[in-house]
């Protein structure tokens, strides 16, 4: 079950290295925010998977929605002359850290019945 | 079935995300390189062009001096070979004297102008009133000429008919060279006439003294004023006119 994400990542990395395509400068900021949201979703999914609570629908919808929302917020912020990218960074960044903590706890408690850490 | 779907979904999403990450990394790094390169390149380019031009200017100037020496030697020899040639030579010398191309000596005055010491640091924004401007230099030179000065130099820059005395920031540009206070003005003429013209009541000295700019005037029996050391090039004026 864990092999698929890894295979997918390797595939994506190879295609990315080979591709001659470059992200146009104007979109660079939005793509960066989208990447952040995507990472958060993936780690959220990983945490859910470790806790045996993984659900594909939630995962996929969350992934797509978060990415769209992040890019849209930053875009709106540019139009409104307010730096909403800060909100996106803080929220998704803190969620990333929360998920890391969850994953750590789950990994360390894998072989035990009770919470030790 | 569910597991297959999950696997496929997971794989494709991870692939998409990692693909985007790699692309973004590549784009950002190449963009940063471009920007840095153009900035650094431009500064380096300008710097190297500047050094090249300065070197060229120096070389050309050395060549000019060499040619002038050769020319002077030829003239000397020519002057000694016939009367007509020596007559022409004398005319040429006089013309050069009037044009400012030779050193001259005679009686005259040396004037030293310093910025006003009255300037008090409390009155910010008023410094402008207490430093020497190009108009002050112009006034002094004008007065000297009116009093019969035959040759004038400012900080050893000989004033020709085409010489400017112009403000350039906090300095004054004379013959395209920048100078700052104190300004040493040498003038050859009748020492008394030159000094009295400047010290006239209500004249240049008084007007400048109001701002504390002092003129120190020293009469001299023998004063040497150096020749003009630049390049003279008349692009628009040619000999002609009504005969």
Image (tube, rainbow, N blue to C red):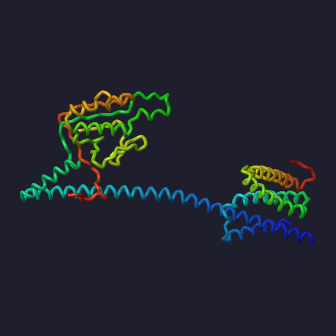
Q: Position of residue A9 (x, y in %)?
A: 77, 66
Seen in the picture, residue B200 relative to B176 is either above or below; the reply is above
Residue at figure coordinates x 88%, y 48% from the top left: A116
Seen in the picture, residue B165 relative to A78 is either above or below; the reply is above
Name the residue nearer the viewer: B77 or A113.
B77
The quadrant the N terminus of chain B occupies is: bottom right
Q: Position of residue A13 (x, y in %)?
A: 72, 67
The quadrant the C terminus of chain B occupies is: bottom left
Regarding residue B186, the answer to whether it shows in the image is: no
Seen in the picture, residue A110 relative to B193 is either above or below; the reply is below
Displayed quadrant of residue B159? top left
Total marks shown come to 0
Displayed quadrant of residue B147? top left
Name the residue nearer the viewer: B235 or A90.
B235
Which residue is farthest front? Answer: B242
Instruction: Left or right? Give the position of A41 relative to B85.
Output: right
Instruction: Left or right? Give the position of A85 relative to A57.
Output: left
């Amino acid at each position: 079950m864990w092999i698929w994400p890894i295979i997918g990542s390797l595939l994506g990395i190879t295609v990315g290295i080979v591709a001659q395509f470059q992200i146009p400068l104007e979109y660079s900021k939005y793509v960066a925010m989208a990447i952040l949201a995507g990472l958060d979703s993936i780690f959220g999914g990983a945490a859910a998977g470790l806790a045996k609570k993984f659900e594909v629908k939630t995962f996929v919808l969350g992934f797509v929605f978060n990415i769209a929302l992040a890019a849209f917020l930053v875009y709106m912020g540019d139009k409104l002359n307010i730096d909403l990218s800060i909100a996106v960074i803080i929220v998704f960044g803190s969620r990333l850290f929360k998920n890391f903590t969850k994953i750590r706890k789950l990994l360390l408690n894998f072989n035990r019945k009770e919470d030790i850490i | 079935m569910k597991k297959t779907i999950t696997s496929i979904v997971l794989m494709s999403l991870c692939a998409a995300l990692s693909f985007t990450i790699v692309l973004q990394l590549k784009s950002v790094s190449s963009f940063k390189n471009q920007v840095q390169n153009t900035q650094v390149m431009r500064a380096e380019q300008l710097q190297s062009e500047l050094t090249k031009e300065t070197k060229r200017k120096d070389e050309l100037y050395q060549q000019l001096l060499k040619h002038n020496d050769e020319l002077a030697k030829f003239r000397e020899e020519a002057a000694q070979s016939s009367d007509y040639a020596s007559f022409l030579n004398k005319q040429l010398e006089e013309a050069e004297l009037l044009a400012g191309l030779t050193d001259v000596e005679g009686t005259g005055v040396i004037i030293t102008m310093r910025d006003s010491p009255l300037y008090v640091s409390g009155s910010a924004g008023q410094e402008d009133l207490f430093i020497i401007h190009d108009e002050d230099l112009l006034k002094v030179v004008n007065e000297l000429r009116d009093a019969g000065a035959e040759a004038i130099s400012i900080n050893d820059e000989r004033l020709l008919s085409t010489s400017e005395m112009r403000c350039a920031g906090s300095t004054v540009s004379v013959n395209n060279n920048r100078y700052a206070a104190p300004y040493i003005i040498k003038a050859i003429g009748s020492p008394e006439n030159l000094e009295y013209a400047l010290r006239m009541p209500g004249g240049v000295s008084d007007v400048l003294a109001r701002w504390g700019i002092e003129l120190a005037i020293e009469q001299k029996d023998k004063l040497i004023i150096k020749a003009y050391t630049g390049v003279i090039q008349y692009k628009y004026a040619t000999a002609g006119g009504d005969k």
